[in-house]
Amino acid sequence: MKRFFLYIALIALLPGLSTRAGFLYAAGAKQQTAVAQKAAAPNPADFIGSDVCATCHADIAKKFGDNPHAKLALRHNGTGATCESCHGPGKAHVDSGGDATKIKQLSKLSPKDLDETCLGCHAGTHPNFLRSPHAKAGVSCTSCHSVHAGDTEAKLLKASQPQLCYQCHADQKAQFNMPIHHKVNEGLLKCSDCHDVHGTFLANNLRSTEDQNQVCTKCHTDVRGPFVFEHAPVRAEGCVTCHTPHGSQNPRLLNMPSIATLCNQCHSPLSAGGVHGLDPGSTTVTPCITCHTMIHGSNASQAFVR
């Protein structure tokens, strides 16, 4: 009987013991984290200041005067973004007479480590970069940006758009040279008007919006809607169901040379057996939009005829 009551008492104590153990474990984990952070944090005495850096790197320091990073430092009494914000403490580098192994060399870092260095400040502005196709392909921040350059190009880009983008995206360059194209080469549009190169939740780095077509309809306002009668593919699959956004040999940037062929990709049963009397895939008949003029959507006709 005594043993029975002993077991009952032990069972009653178990929740308290487990809770206390949990608190002790959490406290230990926090302490270990704090110790690790303290070990990783640089010693303030190891920072020497940008003026010391400029004694050897005068050519870089001279160009850096017009750099947005330097301007940010001036706003904070010289304690903002300085050389050591990116390259780490410079005391060991100076004391060794300029030993390059004693300082963080960004040019020697892997793309991932380089990106993490930049995101130490820019994570709030570009929270999706590490999941972006550029980051996954090893295209680092300095592939497009020249950090030390003066403010000659917007956002410290190495070249202006679209030439910068064309260095990798040769297929798109060819598309923009087609007879019908968005006026990117002419300077009326930029790649970044439609794409967020630092990453989004949409395919191809398209800018995220509550309406997937808003990337297009912010300019093409006449087809924005909403309409009483919506053309289902426009809402379900988007503008690229019928249009090629960069460039095409077809009028209106259509995916097919014939409007009837394009429509018959979805409506071939109707054209074969309905009042239209058209053969599936016919390219010799009057275009569908001769009658169905409001093909993007209508407020008056379910058949989009007005």
Image: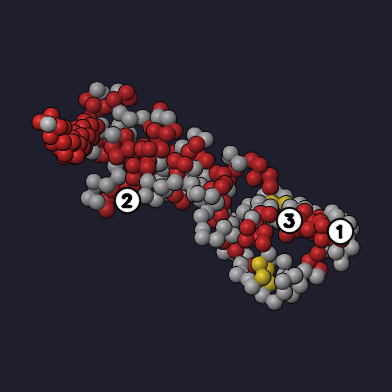
Q: Residues within 10 Å of mark 3 (few under 14, many from 20)?
A: many
Which residue is drawn at the image coordinates 27% and 47% (left, top)? 80
Residue 302 percent across, percent down from the top left: 72, 71
Residue 263 percent across, percent down from the top left: 77, 58
Residue 64: give its label: none
Which residue is drawn at the image coordinates 72% and 66% (left, top)? 295
Secondary element at image label 3 = loop
Q: Nearer the viewer, residue 101 or 110?
A: 110
Residue 254: give its label: 3
Which comes sooner in the sequence, label 2 or label 3?
2
Tag in front: 1 or 2: 1
Q: Nearer the viewer, residue 78 or 245?
A: 245
- Quarter of the picture containing the C terminus is bottom right
| Badge 1 amino acid | Ala
Is residue 143 shown above or below 211? above
The residue that mark 2 highlights is: 71
- Quarter of the picture containing the N terminus is top left
**Is residue 138 something that shows in the picture?**
yes
Secondary element at image label 1 = helix
Which residue is drawn at the image coordinates 66% and 54% (left, top)? 240
Give the distance between the C-alpha atoms of the residues marked 2 and 3, in whole angstroms: 47 Å
The residue that mark 1 highlights is: 272
Q: Residues within 10 Å of mark 2 (few under 14, many from 20)?
A: some
| Badge 3 amino acid | Leu
Give the distance between the C-alpha atoms of the residues marked 1 and 2, in whole angstroms: 68 Å
Is residue 300 shown above or below 195? below
Compared across the picture, whether 258 is left or right of 85 comes to right
Secondary element at image label 2 = helix
Which comes sooner in the sequence, label 3 or label 1?
3
